[in-house]
Amino acid sequence: MILVLLKLQLLKTIRSTAFAKSVLVAVFLAFLAVLLLGYVFIAGILLKEIIVKGLEKEDAYAFLSANLIFFFLTEFMYRYFLQKLPVLDLQSFLHLPIKKKWLMHFLLGKSIVSPLTLIAPLLFSPFAFMEIAPRFGTDAAIYWLGSVILTSWSLHWLMLWFKQKFEDSLAGIGTVFVVFLLGAGSNYFGWFNLGDWMKPLFDWSLTSPLPVLTLLALCIGLYFFAYRYYFDNAYLEDLVDEEVDARINQDIPFLDRFGLAGELANLEWKLILRHKKSRTYLMLAGFLLLYGLFFYTNPLYASDEGFSHMFVFVGSFITGIFMLQYGQLFLSWNSSNFDFYINQKGGLEALIRGKYLLFIGVSLLCLLFSIPYVYFGVEILMIHVAAFLFNIGVVIHMVIYLALWKPKPMDLNKGAMFNYEGVGIAQFLMIIPMMGAPYAIYLPFALFVNQYVGLVALGAVGVIGIIAYPYLVQLIIKRVMSKRYEISASFRQEL
């Protein structure tokens, strides 16, 4: 049955209308994977030299074993964002006389064929046989390497369950963030050292095969744990939790007072909560509110007088990140139903005004949630307020104007990581107004008068933009109306 499923997957691929394009993409990605894995293998060969000479540690093995836990914490993080869930069109098979267990085993077995699976073996195999084998013996090197690889593969099966259950949810992102905080933060702030807790396990593997056997049992156990979860949740029916469904269908009452634009803003809000990619952007905007902690607490940016000029970018980033991320795909979010808005009286104008309302509302929430940064000084709050005014008065129009340059279609149900649907060269250029425009106003006043006058000027230009909002929005509406048929035709292209 496994061979039959492999044959069907191959036939599905070669019969696809986008087969030639898929082959080119696959060849390019394979080349990139081989190149990156080659760098990983070279890093493994040089790992001892990096530790001894680069980090100036006398015992390379002792240092590596004491810090292996941080590699696995990092692996947990990148697996969450990079590891893809096993994909198979189950609706095509579940109604057929095929045992569901074969489908689940095929799904899980297919997932292990990934470059991520090879990172741990390629990185640590050279170290095991070049450093551990000469010192502790070949058996010790094999046992130690087996422990490392089995731990990595156990994370693979654990992540399959974790992502299927919590992907794109607040609980999933929150867990990843807590893992990062406990792993890196606990060591940085001196609370406790996870490496010291795990080092005895790897030291034990030098003298006994028991750790390898224990981790092998754990790896197998996690495989069947993931298998059971997938088996129990593979049904033709898509059961939706009523409580969650009610929550994502709630309107924002405040928007109702803006007429049709407010109704479409509420519709856009529901779209954000219902679809994976938009929901990911919203959650990332929330967690990137912590971005300031990397700068406001860094002694490198401390200043005896005033504050670092870098803080202006940080303030712009914190208060405008959702507007930049979501706004860069301004109309691409509506590519599947764009014709509907064209054929409605005032539909496009209301859609655009509704998106403006949503961008301004979320940016205002980001500003309010960033108020606690006043703990680092009143000037930080002044920066955030000035940056917020400039973002909603000026930057928002620049971002949307760039987003209207040859917008592309996109599938809302696909994830955000390494998904470039809807993204063109204009989206990569948007960082320029985000970084350059505030400094074009702020720096002349900050350098020739003082920084606080620069902030006042930045906020004042933003206020002028807010006052000119009706005129600026009308320019965007006219641009969309003049290109509506061209945009509609591009959205009908096959993804």
Image (cartoon, helix red, strand yellow):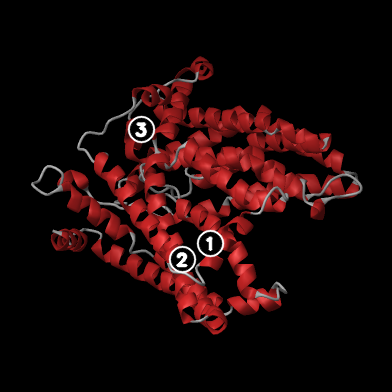
**What residue does disc 2 label?**
147
Q: Select label 2 or label 3 by which is in front.
A: 2
Q: In terms of depth relative to the viewer, which is nearer, 277 or 135?
A: 135
| Distance CA(mark 2)–CA(mark 3) | 60 Å
Picture coordinates of residue 367 (x, y %)? 67, 32
**What residue does disc 3 label?**
342
Q: In terms of depth relative to the viewer, which is nearer, 136 or 465?
A: 136
Going from N to C along the chain, the mark reached first, 1 or 2, is 2
Mark 3, residues whose alpha carbon is within 10 Å: few (<14), some, or many (≥20)? Answer: some
* Residue beneath the point at 70% across and 76% down: 58
Q: Indicate the amino acid at tag 2.
A: Ser
Going from N to C along the chain, the mark reached first, 3 or 1, is 1
Q: Can residue 327 be seen in this view?
A: no
Answer with the quarter of the image where residue 59 lies.
bottom right
Q: Indicate the amino acid at tag 1.
A: Leu
Q: Indicate the amino acid at tag 3.
A: Ile
Picture coordinates of residue 305 (x, y %)? 91, 46
CB under 8 Å between callouts 1 and 2?
yes
Q: Select label 3 or label 1 by which is in front.
A: 1
**What residue does disc 1 label?**
201
**Badge number at residue 252:** none
